[in-house]
Amino acid sequence: MVEKSGVADYNDKDKKYRKWDILMVWLPRIDDFDPDRLGMPVVGITATLGDHHDDGLHQHAMGQLLFAQQGCIRITLAGQLCLLPPTRAAWIPPTVVHRALMRQTVDYCSIYLDVSQFEGLPQTIEVIDVTPLLRALLERIALADFATCWEQGYYAHLLALCIEEIRQARREPLLLPLPLDRRLAVLREAPDQLPPQLQQLVTEVGASGKTINRIFQRETGMSYQQWRQQWRLLKAIEMLAVKTRLSNTASLLGFASDSAFIAFFKDMTGQTPRAYFRRGIEGIGDRPRLNSPVDDI
C-alpha cells in the first residue's frame, strides 16, 4: 500500500497499473481532490479514470498541466472544445472553467502550479507535444510528496527544467472554437455528429452561405469549411486514440477512401496517422511499449 501525504493510499493488489506505474502514486478517486486546499506552489497527482468519467464543470486557482499517458480526454471550455490525445498535454490557466470527459479508461497525470511564482507560462489554454524528457519530468514531479520543498535543491532544478520544457514545447492545433450565434445552435447541440456540407447547413438554418461564413469568421476566425475540417481532424484523432480502425474512421467522417483520409490527416498535421500516434512512444526506454491505435492498418 502506498500513501502520499495522507490523501490517498493505493492497494498493490489492483492490477490496473503497468509494471513501471509502481513508481507513481495513483489516486483511486479524484472527485473530491482540490489542489488549492494544500497551499503548495506545486501539486502533482496521477490517476486511472474509467470509461465515460465526467468530472463536471470546475475551476482551480492554480494552473493545471494535464497529461494523457494513455487514452483520450475531451476538455470543454466556454466557447470551445479541446482534445487531448495520448502523449500530449493541455495547459489550463487559473480560474478557467472546464470539464473533462474520458471516453474510455484513461491514465493521466496532472501538475498544478501557482502561476504567481513562475514566469512565462501560457495565458490561454494550449495543447503541447510532450517529449520523452518532459514526460519523465512530469512523472517525477507527480511522484514527489505534497510537502516537497520546491524552492531549492534537486526539486527546484527539476521544476525549473520542467517549466522551461513547457515554454519551449511545440503547440498543437487541437482546439475548436464554437460559434455562439443562435442560428448555429444545431452544431453546438450535436458535437459528435459530422457537420453537414455548407449547402445542407444553408437549408437547415435558413441562412445564406455568405451569412454562415461571415458568422464563422467573426466568431471562430475560420470559414465554415475550415471549421468543419478542424472538427473532422479532432474527431479523427479522438476515434483513432480509442482504437477505432482507420477504415471505419475514414468512412464515418465522410471520406471516399482510406487514402483520401490519410492525405487529409497529413495535410492537417504534417504526419500520417501512424506517425502521429507513434510520436512520444519512442524513447520510453524499458517501459512496456504502448500499442499505437493504428498499428493494425
Image (cartoon, grey):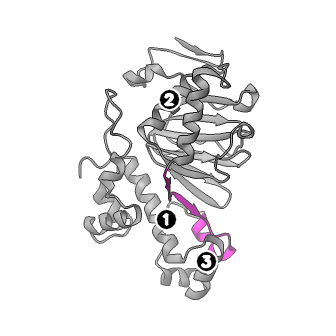
Kindly identify which residue carries mark 1: 231
Answer above or below: position of 102 versus 45. below
Amino acid at dot 3: Gln
Mark 2 Cα shell of 10 Å, populated few (<14), some (14-19), many (≥20): many
Q: In the picture, residue 82 is in which quadrant?
A: bottom right
Mark 1 Cα shell of 10 Å, populated few (<14), some (14-19), many (≥20): many
Q: Position of residue 60 (x, y in %)?
A: 72, 40
Amino acid at dot 1: Trp
Residue at point 51%, 35% (across, down)? 108
Q: Residue furthest toward the left?
A: 297
Instruction: Give the spatial CA distance, label 1 vs label 3.
Output: 15 Å
Q: Nearer the viewer, mark 3 or mark 2?
A: 2
Q: Position of residue 4 (x, y in %)?
A: 60, 17
SS assignment at label 3 = helix
Residue at point 49%, 71% (across, down)? 228
User: Can residue 34 be seen in the rendering of this structure?
Assistant: no
Q: Is residue 66 left or right of residue 240?
A: right
Instruction: Give the spatial CA distance, label 3 vs label 2.
Output: 40 Å
Answer above or below: position of 243 versus 250. above
Kindly identify which residue carries mark 3: 217
Residue at point 24%, 48% (across, down)? 296
Instruction: Give the spatial CA distance, label 2 vs label 1.
Output: 31 Å
Kindly identify which residue carries mark 2: 139
Question: Residue 185 lies in magenta, yes or no?
Answer: yes
Q: Position of residue 146 (x, y in %)?
A: 65, 21
The magenta-colored residue range is 170-188
